[in-house]
Image (cartoon, helix red, strand yellow):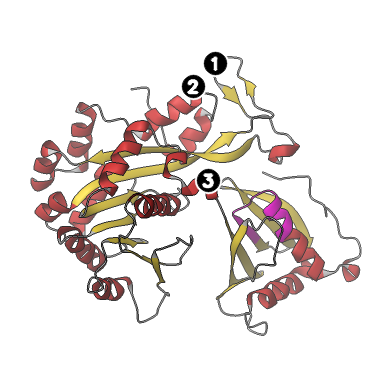
Amino acid sequence: MNVNNSPKDTYDNTKAIDVVALVDNILQTAVKYHASDVHFEPTGADLAIKYRLDGVLNTFEKIPKSLSDNVIARLKVLGGLLTYRNDIPQEGRIEIEPSKDGQVTDQRLAIFPTIHGQRAVVRLFYSHKELMDLKQLGFSDQIYSAIKEVASKNMGVLLLTGPAGSGKSTTLAAILIYILQKYPGKSVVTLEDPVEIRINNATQTQITPHGQMTFPTALRSLLRQDPQVLMIGEIRDAETAKIAIEAGLTGHLLMSTMHSGTPAGAFLRLLEMGIEPYQVTSSISAVLNQRLVRKLCEKCKRKSSGDNSFEPVGCEDCLNTGFKGRILIAEMVQLDSELRKAILAKADIDQLENILEEKGHTNMVSHGKRLIAEGMTTMDELTKVCGIITDN
């Protein structure tokens, strides 16, 4: 979808363009509309500037091909990268200029060579003070109570599942802040790649890609540092999974994320990684599965003609998308005797899903349908995030 209220739609005199001001304007406008990423994508004809707004990539403007190299070079200067190397991927950070509101906390830059020139992506991180309060994230009362129950324990593993960009890091940070506030004096340590949210009174360590300190190496060492609460950014391999499960069994409360579509899928992934069924049933306290759906713009949404739901319209306030902000949908599974028996018997995913259905488990789709009924989002949005939705 093209966004057509760009401040620079055409560039008749490319020689007169101030590239420094141009790049600054692109990044400042991204912050204005709260974009999470800015893409500088080279094509055969131009350099497309795209903003990711509420999880969806929108074309903002197109810059003449003649300016492409200069724009990328300016980004490299801002990110402290090698301007003379155009043939290799590079990553860096763009220093944040002091601003009145201080809403941007970090800017990460990644450069990658393509057949049409270098492609750049700037990822923007914002300060969301309201999202650091666990109660404000949008969980149902039932899930909120269950999370607090898990957070009160001295051992066990809480897994968060969902694709990239589903708010898992924000949820983990909010849980850690809740623990630090509710149980002051607890030793809280995190291993992240990268550290996205700074948490007061927590020890946070950044794992660098391709470095000697990998997740397994750092985790083994940390277990000798007397931590009570551990957070690992992601369980990516069998070795990390094994150490994480052992930590949860030996007097540590451990939290991490895993790429899985459903809670049942998370249990099976652990088994596929070589974790013994009895270790899964003994260590996993709960699996929290979540997604983010776009929230209808309150200024321009209108009631649908067919039913009581609402539909997007588009206005200047939402950059003509019809949506502004995102809202959480989630489901949580805590292990009980029936699920434990099924996992010990190495049940497949269909069997686990059937058990949950028979227990009356409230899944993400049910949560999303409630939001549709409240006029917060649309069925199209829910379908995009959750896939094909049946009526049962």
- Of badges 3 and 1, the one in the foreground is 3
- Vertically, is 90 above or below 158? below
The answer to whether the residue labelled 2 contacts the one labelled 3, judged by CB atoms less than 8 Å apart, is: no
Locate residue 258 relative to residue 380 in the image: left or right: left
Question: Most extreme residue toward the bottom, as rendered?
Answer: 84
> Which amino acid type is shown beneath numbered disc 3?
Glu
Q: CA distance from mark 1 to mark 2?
A: 7 Å
- Residue visible at 54% across and 40% down in the picture: 326
Is 359 included in the stretch rendered in magenta?
Answer: no
- Vertically, is 229 above or below 223? above
Q: Secondary structure at mark 1?
A: loop
Which quadrant of the rendered structure holds the N terminus? top right
Q: Point out which mark residue 373 bears.
A: 2
Q: What residue range appears in magenta?
A: 27-39
Q: Quadrant location of residue 343?
A: top left
The answer to whether the residue labelled 1 contacts the one labelled 2, judged by CB atoms less than 8 Å apart, is: yes
Q: Point out which mark residue 308 bears.
A: 1
Residue 319 visible in the picture: yes
Is 31 included in the stretch rendered in magenta?
Answer: yes
The answer to whether the residue labelled 3 contacts the one labelled 1, judged by CB atoms less than 8 Å apart, is: no
Q: Residues within 10 Å of mark 2 (few under 14, many from 20)?
A: some
Instruction: Where is residue 234? Give x, y as percent.
Output: 35, 61
Q: CA distance from mark 2 to mark 3?
A: 25 Å
Mark 3 / mark 1, whichever is N-terminal:
3
Q: Point out which mark residue 130 bears.
A: 3
> Which amino acid type is shown beneath numbered disc 2?
Ala
